[in-house]
Image (spheres, rainbow, N blue to C red):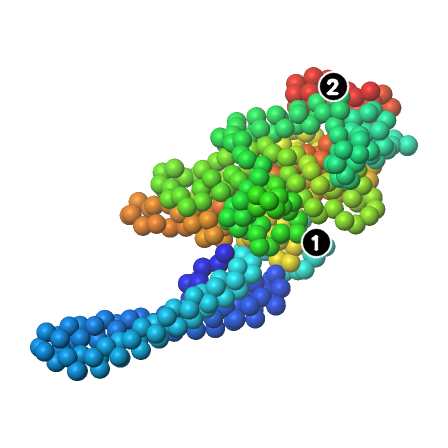
Amino acid sequence: MLQLSVLRENTQEVKERLYKRNPAFLNVVDEVLVLDEKTRAAKQEMENNQAEANKIAKQVGELMKNGKREEAEEVKKQSSSLKEQAKNLEEIVKQLEENLFAKLVTIPNTPNAIVPEGKTPEENVTVFENGEIPTLAEGAMPHWDLITKYDLIDFELGTKITGAGFPVYRGKGARMQRGLVNFFLDEAMKAGYEEIVPPYLVNAESGFGTGQLPDKEGQMYHAQVDDLYLIPTAEVPVTNLYRDVILKEEQLPVKNVAYSPCFRREAGSWGAHVRGLNRLHQFEKVEIVQITTPEQSYAILDEMVKHVQGLLEKLELPYRILRLCGGDMGFTSALTYDFETYSAAQQRWLEVSSTSNFESFQANRLKCRYKTKDGKNQLVHTLNGSALALPRILATILENNQTPEGIKIPKALVPYVGFDVIN
């Protein structure tokens, strides 16, 4: 959530940056500032009313002390009138504050200055590309046919148990899942991340803290009786470990990693681009989260990007890095880099990671601060990245490494799965 003080003091800069997302947000900023002025004016009137009431209360005491009962009774009437006004003013201020907050939380984060303008994924900018696009032999299969041929995943059984988008992994398919998770976790811990095993359901306060609520209610599974939400990513519970926490500057950066299943109600359209593992309601992901000072955050974003690069290179996958344009960024992000691997059988790029700096946007919602060396409390910056999401990684490994003799396993993964070929 943007800070009101930033909106007031840097209105033009905020508008210029929000313009990269959508010009419509400029009107919302104006509406927030008008509500803010009305709220502050109402508060000032309420405070003046209280000051006058206190002044009159003292007068009543003095008059009674001096035996001026009639005058005291007249002043009491004024006091009663002021008290009635105070109740009305309190209600007005409360309503204005609620309206202001409701409008403020609809404004997304302001894009960093280097974020390109644009509205669609086609306007994202490729900043790096690595690896050769594999050339597959004639008759090569997409992953949904490979998993049937080698009995790795059963989509029909998942549909029977739960519904579409909930696959059942079995045999070497299950071992590939477990091996990838352990590989990603081990690599993160080598890089200094502390492993966390978080809850997989969160309350509404946690969803609000990281920006999923009220922005993404329709994408989250809601256990209504308990008012809990299944997590769409481990970012939510891990970042909320630090909600309402004041960290010490020497504790920063905080580095956490967590594996979790992720639950999203987002599948919808039909076609090859959502077939097989391309889009699921439940999938597994390893998430890295960092909390740091504003001065360090963009250097740390670069560090996290390099970490994801290293994973993809060890898995011998061709990949590219995109800097997302303003219209394609998530609600809470100030700058996002997407990683895509190339699916040789589908002949297209598949997103496998988003790595983002949220600056103080989440921290303001979370009330997560740190105490500087001079004793002041300041909002932290939060960052997170997928390192990595499994379904499309598995899809590209299967497709890009298929041969007439079977599917070859990347060397870095062999110790984790216990085999070097699927046949």
Instruction: Give the left or right position of residue 23, taking residue 362 as reference.
Output: right
Tell me residue 400's x, y (percent).
78, 32
Residue situated furthest right in the rendering: 139
**Is residue 140 positioned above or below 125 on the image?**
above
Where in the figure is residue 110, as x and y percent of width and height?
53, 58
In front here: 120 or 167? 167
Q: Of marks 2 and 1, which one's residue comes earlier in the chain?
A: 1
Q: Which residue is mark 2?
A: 420
Q: Do callouts 2 and 1 mark residues in contact (Cβ within 8 Å)? A: no
- Kindly indicate the quadrant of the structure image that contains residue 354: top right
For the question of whether residue 343 can be seen, the reply is no
Question: Of residues 122 and 163, which is closer to you in this image?
Answer: 163
- Disc 2 crowd rating (10 Å Cα; few below 14, some 14-19, many 20+) is some
Identify whether 35 is placed above or below 355.
below
Q: Residue at x 53, y 50 (%)?
A: 208
Residue count near mark 1 (Cα–Cα under 10 Å), binned few <14, some 14–19, many ≥20: some
Residue assigned mark 1: 121
Relative image position of residue 48 (x, y in whole percent)? 29, 74
For residue 139, side relative to residue 220 (left or right): right
Q: Residue furthest left?
A: 66
Observer able to see residue 69 = yes
Query: Which residue is rendered at x = 71% and y = 35% of the image?
Result: 391
Distance from label 2 to label 1 (Cα)?
36 Å
Q: Secondary structure at mark 2?
A: loop
